[in-house]
Image (cartoon, rainbow, N blue to C red):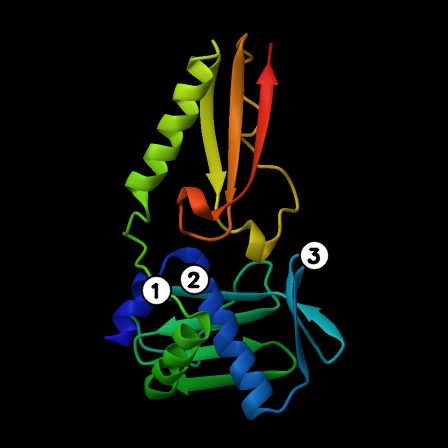
Amino acid sequence: MDRKEIEDLNNPRFGSFGEFVFADYASNILNYDLQKLHRDGKDFVIANQKIDVGATRRFFQKNFNNNTQRTIKNKDVHVFFYKDCCFIKYPDFFEEKLEWDYVEKLFGKWKESRKVEVPKSTEKLYEEEYKNIVLQVNSFFSGNNFISRTIHRTKTKRFGLRESPGNLLPKKEIEKSVTVYIDFHDEKRIESNIRFIICIFIY
């Protein structure tokens, strides 16, 4: 069951679990001095090196083949999930094949550390609640003769807001319009979980 849950994680959570697998093995098994970073596009500092960890599940239906050399583009550490194991590749440092029993135990630890239910990638979190927020925004601005559009993010508290959303500025300028950007603390897209709001007006 845990294997299916892992396969169904949405992309950010799957990436987080891949980082967790690497960090646990490197620090608890190999006794590396590992420090969390999560800035400047890097996840950890290990052996005085800043590293970015990538994970992929595209081999989930295949068994591991030691003769096949694979990497994840632009990543320093590669965590591959296969049908029969999880394989960590940290070039010039170590490679390790982890059995699924061990990976599933790590998955339990990862879920516990997050203290939240792990949603599947197919789930639409708080869809109705978010629609109600958008409805309130549209109602407020239409009452003030503005056309409004609403966009949002849910990950910036954890990963940082290094740059503004690419769609913050509309492609076409429309008079008396406003873009409302809502930033939530996490995936709970409810009014009480709003972190901040930015409005961009065009007069």
Q: Label 2: state its secondary structure.
A: helix
Q: Is residue 72 left or right of residue 66?
A: right
Dot placed on the residue nearer the N-terminal end, 2 or 1 = 2
Q: Quadrant of the C terminus?
A: top right
Q: Is residue 45 above or below residue 120?
A: below
C-alpha gap between disc 2 and disc 3: 19 Å
Residue under pointer 2: 13
Circles 2 and 1: CB atoms closer than 8 Å = yes
C-alpha gap between disc 2 and disc 1: 8 Å
Residue type, mark 2 in image: Arg
Q: Is residue 22 above or below residue 174?
A: below
Numbered label attached to residue 118: 1
Q: Is residue 119 above or below residue 182?
A: below
Residue 20 x %, y %: 50, 74
Q: Quadrant of the N terminus?
A: bottom left
**Toward the viewer: 157 or 57?**
157
Residue 108 x %, y %: 36, 79
Numbered label attached to residue 198: none
Residue type, mark 1 in image: Val
Circles 1 and 3: CB atoms closer than 8 Å = no
Residue type, mark 3 in image: Asp
